């Protein structure tokens, strides 16, 4: 990994022919999802261990020997060490917003508790409104003492304000109390990310069953996915990463536009995420995320030549 994320994205966009670029974009996304898996394990395991230590200390003071221990989420323990966090689909080129809508429509075709699921597209204005709210946010991975210092009452107040911020930012069309698949807008800048207020608002809303996340690239996707799926100081339930892919914007093959990363995340009790709580439900290669083979048969196993070529080329260009 040499050069900034933007420089690496620009180099991948310059690769010809498209078949080689498509594989290089795919490898970059798979590498990002391996980082997501590692970060989530470390982040959640640390917080669980600290909570259990605090419970042990409290139980000793009260002579309570029957306290229950916190555990890692099943969907997270089902991810093997060093494996991608979810399936990685083949890279494509086209209208990014349309790809996001099609992904959301397929996700919403599944009912939740026999009730329909509605697709709702958030706008930049909606994201700005959520980011501008004055509710306090404890960042994922903050010092545990800071998190523990926040009382349950305070956490509920913050979560309530976050839910209200999301509801107020919904598009003008009436969605009522429908279960929602929220589609985020295509980033306008190469460094655009969700931000902690937006991720908290999405997580705190009980109506949001899934999120179609559009990130400016693999590195931004790592930050965004961890924010939505990692441990939360406010106790909001996580989203489970289900599938991800690289999409070159319309004309990207010819115009050399950098690809964006599109990721589908679902609540653990909805859709495909239900099966991901078990290792046998993850029917894709744990090495590269391809659903066409297993890890032992993975042609990409043993190293990414394309990634090595990318690093060498970027170094040679002195970018």
Image (cartoon, rainbow, N blue to C red):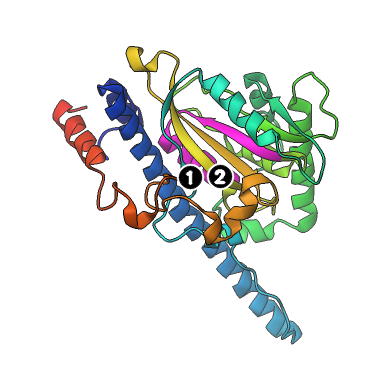
Q: Quadrant of residue 69?
A: bottom right
The dot on residue 169 is none
Please give the residue where the numbered disc 2 appears in the rendered image: 242
| Residue at x-position 26% and y-position 39% | 307
Q: Mark 2: few, some, or many residues within 10 Å (few <14, many ≥20)?
A: many
Q: In the depicted view, which residue is nearer to us: 250 or 40? A: 250
Could you tell me which secondary element the residue under label 2 belongs to? Answer: strand
For the image, the number of numbered tags is: 2
Please give the residue where the numbered disc 1 appears in the rendered image: 87
Q: Quadrant of residue 124?
A: top right
| Residue at x-position 46% and y-position 50% | 284
Say if mark 2 contacts mark 1, CB within 8 Å: yes
Between discs 2 and 1, the one toward the N terminus = 1
Direction from residue 303 to residue 262 in the image, left or right: right
Direction from residue 318 to residue 233 in the image, left or right: right
x and y percent of residue 306 in the render? 24, 37
Write the start and end of the magenta stretch as one range.
209-228
In the rendered view of the protein, which quadrant contains the N terminus? top left
**In magenta segment, residue 112:** no
Vertical comparison of 165 with 138: above or below = above
Q: Is residue 232 visible?
A: no
């Amino acid at each position: 990994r040499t050069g900034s994320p933007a420089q690496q994205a620009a180099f991948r966009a310059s690769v010809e022919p498209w078949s080689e670029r498509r594989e290089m974009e795919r490898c970059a996304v798979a590498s990002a999802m391996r980082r997501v898996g590692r970060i989530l394990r470390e982040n959640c395991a640390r917080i669980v261990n600290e909570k259990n230590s605090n419970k042990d200390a409290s139980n000793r003071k009260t002579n309570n020997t029957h306290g229950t221990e916190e555990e890692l989420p099943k969907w997270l323990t089902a991810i093997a060490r060093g494996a991608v966090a979810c399936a990685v689909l083949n890279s494509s080129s086209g209208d990014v917003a349309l790809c996001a809508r099609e992904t959301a429509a397929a996700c919403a075709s599944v009912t939740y508790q026999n009730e329909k699921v509605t697709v709702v597209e958030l706008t930049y204005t909606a994201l700005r409104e959520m980011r501008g709210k004055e509710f306090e946010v404890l960042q994922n991975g903050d010092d545990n003492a800071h998190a523990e210092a926040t009382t349950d009452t305070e956490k509920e107040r913050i979560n309530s304000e976050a839910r209200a911020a999301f509801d107020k930012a919904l598009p003008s069309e009436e969605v009522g109390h429908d279960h929602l698949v929220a589609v985020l807008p295509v980033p306008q800048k190469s460094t655009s990310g969700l931000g902690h207020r937006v991720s908290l608002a999405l997580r705190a809303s009980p109506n949001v069953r899934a999120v179609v996340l559009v990130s400016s690239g693999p590195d931004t996707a790592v930050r965004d996915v961890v924010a939505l799926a990692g441990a939360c100081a406010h106790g909001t339930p996580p989203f489970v990463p289900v599938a991800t892919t690289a999409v070159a914007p319309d004309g990207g093959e010819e115009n050399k536009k950098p690809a964006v990363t599109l990721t589908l995340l679902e609540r653990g009790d909805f859709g495909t995420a239900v099966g991901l709580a078990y290792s046998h439900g993850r029917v894709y290669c744990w090495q590269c995320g391809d659903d066409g083979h297993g890890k032992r048969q993975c042609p990409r196993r043993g190293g990414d030549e394309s990634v090595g070529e990318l690093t060498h080329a970027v170094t040679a260009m002195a970018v």
